Image (cartoon, helix red, strand yellow):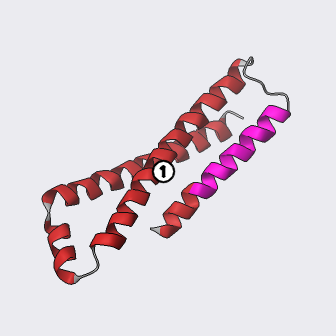
Amino acid sequence: MLYILGLGTLFLVGQLYAWYLLFHSGQKFQAHSAAYLYVISGMHAIHIIGGLIFLTYFYWKSRTTLNDFSTSLVYFTDPIAKYQLHLFGIYWHFLGIVWLYLLLFFVAFK
């Protein structure tokens, strides 16, 4: 879980650096193609931030409440907790698929 937090944070740092390079190369918001790139990558960054917030919440919850066997047994048999973890997994997989699609799209139409 910490690897995912680290990779998500690294992605956001890389995204900020890419925006910095794009902005200082003369690609301002007035150009339609540059504005489109800023919006698409910005929306993805917002979703990554949301995912990192929930991942931090799940990590904190697991570190504080799942210290003994009986608590973890109750937590992982709770249908609501299982459903939350399932939805969170779908969310991260969706972000990964969108990222790969956008990467292939921008490489193909470079």
Q: In this orientation, does residue 97 appear?
A: no
Q: Quadrant of the N terminus?
A: bottom left
Residue 9 drawn above or below residue 50? below
Q: In x, y percent, where is residue 29?
A: 72, 22
**Residue 63: quadrant of the picture:** bottom left
| Magenta region includes residue 64 | no
Kindly report the secondary structure that dominates the magenta region of the rendered protein.
helix
Q: With 15 as the anchor, is 95 left or right in this view?
A: left
Q: In x, y percent, where is residue 34?
A: 71, 26
In the rendered structure, which segment of residues is drawn in magenta?
Answer: 9-24
Q: In x, y percent, where is residue 51?
A: 44, 50
The secondary element bearing badge 1 is classed as: helix
Residue visible at 22% across and 75% down in the picture: 72
Residue visible at 20% across and 69% down in the picture: 76
Q: Quadrant of the C terminus?
A: top right
Q: Residue furthest bottom?
A: 69
The residue nearer to you, when weighing 86 against 81, is 81
Q: Which residue is mark 1?
A: 96
Q: Residues within 10 Å of mark 1 (few under 14, many from 20)?
A: few
Residue 46 drawn above or below residue 10? above
Residue 59 drawn above or below residue 21? below
Q: In x, y percent, where is residue 98?
A: 49, 43
**Residue 28: quadrant of the picture:** top right
- Specify the amino acid type for callout 1: Gly
Residue visible at 44% across and 51% down in the picture: 53
Residue 49 drawn above or below residue 85? above
